[in-house]
Each structure stands twice: as structure tokens, then as C-alpha cells.
Amino acid sequence: MSDQETEQEKDGQATPEEGADAAKEADVDSLSDLAELEKIKAELQKEKEKAAKELEEGEEDEEDLREVDYLQKLLGLSIKFEHHVGMWLMTAYIDCGIKYDHRLAESYMTQLSTIQSFLRLLEKVDGVTRELVTKDCVLKLRNVVQMIYKNQVKPLYKEVSLMKKKPKSESLEHFKENWNERLEDLQKACDFEYQVLDVKGFILK
């Protein structure tokens, strides 16, 4: 292997320090999200009771139904991203003979699980809190996906591109296909709430 190829491979790999920093940053984000989740539970409980009363009185309107449908779509997206990372991405790393950072992946999946907890709380809640927290969930989901792409997806595909003999991995193909499909769905969700929030830059070519 030439010196140039060796340097290219080094460039494609995160150093232990970078990996530790990414994991530490993700852990801090997870703890922050969990603390925030506990903080808003009281507010959500009040609005949940109000929504339940309105539902009994038949006051649920079409807008509420659309919002609940949107929440369910976001919840489904979050669950699918978590599955793709824990299932296809991990297997792709193994198939390609590249070390998989379980701690980093686990921290991202914890963040996705926290987002799911927020969304489940919001399904039967109405009012300003639901709207604000829903927007925050969209941002958090987009940010987690961005970090997964930056620290796990992009390095993997860069390493594979440098290999002279390409590995035969169905998981690699499955991940790419599903990842891109979920990003298209997430882009639609972002367009619903944010006109300028772009996730197309994370699509794998």
C-alpha cells in the first residue's frame, strides 16, 4: 500500500480522541434531553387533562387530527432510524471488517429513544406546549441524524470507497436504501414545520 493510500485511510478514520469526544458530547445531549423530558411532564399533564376533557365533549377538530397524524409519522421515523443504526449499520461495519463504536451508537439510540418518549407524551396533549415541543423534536431528530451521518455513516462509506476489493455486504446496501428513504420522509416532515430545514445533504450517493 502506498504512503498516499495510507494517509487516505488515516483521514477516513476517527481518532480515539475524536471518538471519545463525540461519545461524550452525545452522552451530555442524552442527559440534557432526559432532564428536559422530566421538566415538561408537569406542563404536558395539565394539557393532557384538558385535551381529554375536550375529547369527551366532542371538541376535537380536524387540526388536532392532523397534528396527531404528524406526531405519529415523526415517531415512526425516529423508530426506523434507531433500527437502521442498530441493525443495518452495525452489521455493515462488521461485514466490512471495520471497528464499530458501540458506545457512540448506543448514545445516539438513547437520544432517539428520548425523542420517541417526547412524541408519545404529545400524542394526547393539546395546546401551545405540544406545538413547541413538536418543533423541538423535529430539530432534535434532525440533529441526531446529522451526528450519526457525520460520525458513523460518512466514515464507513469513505473507508469502503478506499478499499481496493469492495466487500460484499447486503447490510451495506440495505442500510443505504433505507437511510435514503427515511431521509426523504424526514425532509417532508421538516418541510411541514420548517421551510429551510434541509436534510438532503445526508443522502448517500
Image: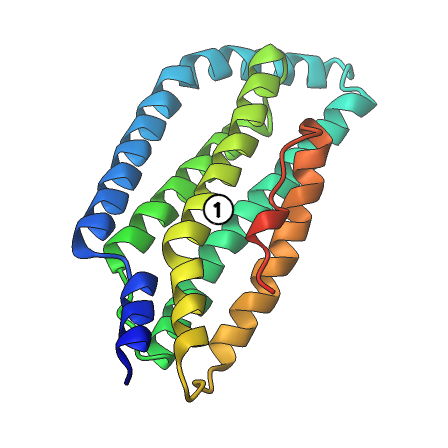
Residue at the image point whose x is 47% and y is 30% from the top? 118
The residue type indicated by label 1 comes to Val
Foreground residue among 136 and 41: 136
- Image height check: is 53 above or below 82? above
Q: Quadrant of the N terminus?
A: bottom left
Q: Position of residue 186 (x, y in %)?
A: 63, 45
Which residue in the structure is indicated by mark 1? 145
- Image height check: is 5 above or below 75? below
Horizontal side of residue 185 vs 145, given as left or right? right
Q: Position of residue 107 (x, y in %)?
A: 30, 46
- Image height check: is 22 above or below 84? above
**Structural crowding at the residue carrying mark 1, measured as other residues with C-alpha within 10 Å and reported as few (<14), some (14–19) or many (≥20):** many
Label 1 element class: helix
Q: Position of residue 75 (x, y in %)?
A: 56, 42
- Image height check: is 152 above or below 56? below
Q: Position of residue 90 (x, y in %)?
A: 37, 67
